Amino acid sequence: MKKLLIVALAVCFTGQLKAQDVTGSWVGAISVRGVKLHLVFNIKKTSDTSYSSTFDSPDQKAFGIACSSTFVKKDSLFIGMAIIKGGYKGILAGHDSVSGVFTQGPAKFPLGIKKITDAEKASLSADKVRPQTPKQPYGYHSEDVEYDNADKSLHYGATFTRPDGDGKYPAVIIISGSGTQDRNGTMLGHQPYWVLADYLTKNGIAVLRVDDRGAGKSSLGTDTNNKTSVDFSYDVEASLNYLETRTDVDKKHLGLIGHSEGGMIAPMVAARRNDVAFIVLWGGPGVNGAKILTEQSALALKEKGMDSVSVAAYKKLHFSILSLFAMSATKADLDQQIPPVVEAWKKEQTQKTLDALNVPNATMEDIEKVYDGMYSSGWLRFFISYDPATALSKVKCPVLAVTGEKDTQVDAAENLGRIKDVLTKSGNKDFEVKTIPGLNHLFQTAHTGDVSEYEQISETMSPVAMNIICSWIKIHVK
């Protein structure tokens, strides 16, 4: 899923790094499956011995994010980033560089940062040329709006677009994929949700695209570590409630377009509410997260050149352990169940396979630590265990499920096959399942479909895909 991308981070520098001046901007980059993401720390001195800073993720157009906690011990810098369940630990390597490690959940990335000038920082923040990004005049009504959920505990920022002129228009809400994203789905210079909204609005369909919790104008809320897709589905309900207050919306034709994880959330909402007239699942999962994450990890091993026998062995073990999450009420329960699974698996493998997977050098404690880190995230624990069929089988409104043939994050054949099977068995009378040739997870025209291509492709979203979605919706709002 799009969780590969870091959207909302918090960083704070406090304390004294020896006698050196650490004020200014510092940049580094991490690589996630070939995607290079720049991280910028902007440090200001608040007193003789303390500092404050903000964080930027220029590749995702996220700037000035407030910090959490940091302390300095001798020449070491420790940064706690609670909002992403991670942090940064670095050692000052000179007056203009820090060498360290960035962590997010169980993942670790080497990260060195160096001081940069204002001009260098500005160049990182410059917009990439993406020909499909909408430009004014749009040719339709565009309005930034804000609203709250029912109990006023959450505030949302969004953009509503509709054709010019009086009247009531069918409307859709775009539901984002995993990770904190702004209303446009900004990533690596692309803004796919804005591009799709622009296309739909020009074709007579109103669109509400919404900042996720903690992004843009939307509030973060509380207890963030334990929020799951179910919680986010109620954010969508708040957006539905807002649309129904508008006089320019046709309340009989309200739909949802869910991308990636959003394609898992849309059926949750549609199963609960009769006012959802249709849903579109854009690269949405049909199988549980254990299977999706296992396939993604296996693909990463293949890309590193690991042999097929070792990859298959890894898949078996990884999926077996992830399947334990649903049966483990606590982390201690999980740790108790892992050893027998691992030992039984080891007996089935050749020494060549064990060596290829570095098993002899990994202790049981090492293995448990990896999965404990995943279990500690409420969102990830839910995603791993949740079966999309739970809600999808209860959806009676029309459904369009579309996935790119080259999608390497949500396999088209496996997931669309399961979606088709569930909807058929549940008796849904109006659904279409479609694989679109040549497209990746974002619906870009791709060569391999790998995540590393996303930034390199100038196209934000294939017109073929947008036409398929738009044409299907127009048929269902007549």
Image (spheres, rainbow, N blue to C red):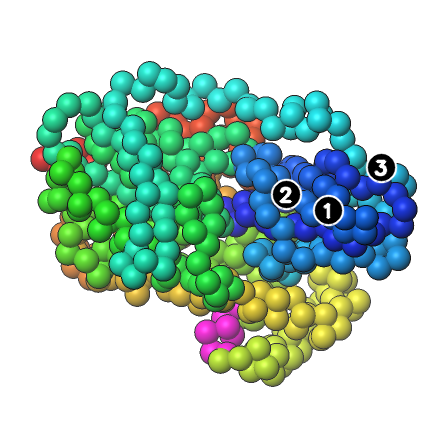
Q: Is residue 300 above or below residue 394?
A: above
Using a 10 Å C-alpha cutoff, classify the residue at mark 2 as few (fewer than 14 neighbours), some (14 to 19) or many (20 or more): many
C-alpha gap between disc 3 and disc 2: 18 Å
Q: Which mark is residue 46?
A: 1
* Pointer 3 with pointer 1, Cβ within 8 A: no
Question: Residue at image x 65%, y 50%?
Answer: 11
Q: Is residue 324 magenta?
A: yes
Q: Which residue is mark 2?
A: 55
Image spot of residue 66 (x, y percent): 59, 48
Q: Which residues are magenta?
A: 322-328
Using a 10 Å C-alpha cutoff, classify the residue at mark 3 as few (fewer than 14 neighbours), some (14 to 19) or many (20 or more): some
Q: Which mark is residue 96?
A: 3
* Amino acid type, callout 3: Asp
Q: Nearer the viewer, residue 206 or 282?
A: 206
Question: Residue at image x 90%, y 46%?
Answer: 19
**The quadrant where residue 321 appears:** bottom right
| Left or right: 104 in relation to 212 | right
Can you see residue 119?
A: yes
Can you see residue 437?
A: no
Secondary structure category for the residue under label 2: strand
Question: Residue at image x 30%, y 47%?
Answer: 147
Which of the marked residues, 3 or 1, is nearer the chain's N terminus?
1
